[in-house]
Image: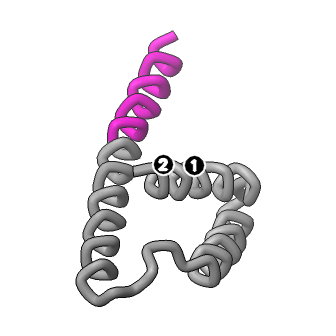
Amino acid sequence: MEALKDLRSEIDSLDRELIQLFAKRLELVSQVGKVKHQHGLPIYAPEREIAMLQARRLEAEKAGISADLIEDVLRRFYARILCQ
């Protein structure tokens, strides 16, 4: 059972890292929004979203991760940001 405890501990650690990465990503997206606003650019760029999602789907597939899962996570980020 010690092996199970160790594995769960490692998962917990990775979850904390993911949260920090999500926070950093949200901060960077916020900065992008400010730069776009300063330069009179539209906040939402559908062509950028499509290209980014396609690229991330490919990266996910190469890593053996569900492309749909990654797209779902990223779309949730977009939805959250666009609501702010």
Q: Residue at x 42, y 36 (%)?
A: 15
Say which of 34 and 40 sits in front.
Answer: 40
Count how many numbered circles sit on residues in the image: 2
Would you identify the image quadrant in which residue 61 lies?
A: bottom right
- Name the element at disc 2: helix
Residue 23 drawn at (x, y percent): 31, 49
Q: Residue at x 60, y 74 (%)?
A: 49
Q: Are marks 2 and 1 in contact (CB under 8 Å)?
A: yes
Residue at image x 35%, y 53%? 21
Q: Is residue 56 above or below residue 47?
A: above
Residue at the disc numbered 2: 80
Q: CA distance from mark 2 to mark 1?
A: 6 Å
What numbered label is drawn on residue 76?
1
Q: Residues within 10 Å of mark 1 (few under 14, many from 20)?
A: few
Residue 34's spot in the image, x, y percent? 26, 73
For the record, the magenta segment spans 1-16
Q: Residue at x 33, y 81 (%)?
A: 36
Q: Amino acid at mark 1?
A: Arg
Task: Give the overall secondary structure of the magenta segment.
Answer: helix
Above-or-below relation of 40 to 74: below
